[in-house]
Image (cartoon, rainbow, N blue to C red):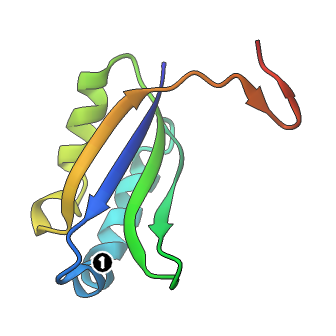
Amino acid sequence: MLFAVMFEDEPAQAAELRRKHLPDHLRFLEKHKERVVAAGPLVSAAGEAQGGLWLVEAEDRETVDRMVQEDPFWPTGLRKSVRIAAWKQVFAEGRRQI
């Protein structure tokens, strides 16, 4: 099953926390490359990261929730909120997928 994981960051110290913990976060994503289909920051019109988005292949929501909590960004206070939703792709590469 494919899940969309949407993170909203705390703006107060986001840039500093992101810079400090980014290498560990990227190693974490690499460690889970068999599950993480895609990941990256959500950016404001000014080009500043304000959250993130992952697409994760997993058996269930609980597996994804455990991944979120194991991410080095999670305990730092960077993340203000997270939303995990099952996602069904119906269109890609210019054509219907169903």
- Tell me the kind of residue under disc 1: Arg
Image position of 4 with respect to 46: above or below: above
- Residue at the right extreme? 94
Q: Position of residue 72 (x, y in %)?
A: 22, 61
- Identify the residue shown where x is 64% and y is 25%: 89
- Identify the residue shown where x is 51% and y is 26%: 87
Q: Position of residue 17 (x, y in %)?
A: 22, 80
Write down the quadrant of residue 61 in the picture.
Answer: top left
- Identify the residue shown where x is 50% and y is 45%: 33
Image position of 42 with respect to 67: above or below: below
Which is nearer the eye, 38 or 79?
A: 79
Q: Position of residue 36 (x, y in %)?
A: 48, 42
Count of numbered tags: 1
- Residue at the front extreme? 45
Image position of 9 with respect to 17: above or below: above
Circle 1 is placed at which residue position?
18
- Tell me: 87 left or right of 98: left
Instruction: Determine crowd level at label 1: few under 14, some 14-19, many 20+ residues with C-alpha closer than 10 A.
Output: some
- Identify the residue shown where x is 26% and y is 75%: 21
> Which type of secondary structure does the marked residue at label 1 adopt?
helix
Q: Position of residue 71 (x, y in %)?
A: 25, 54
- Residue at the top extreme? 98
Which image quadrant: the C terminus? top right
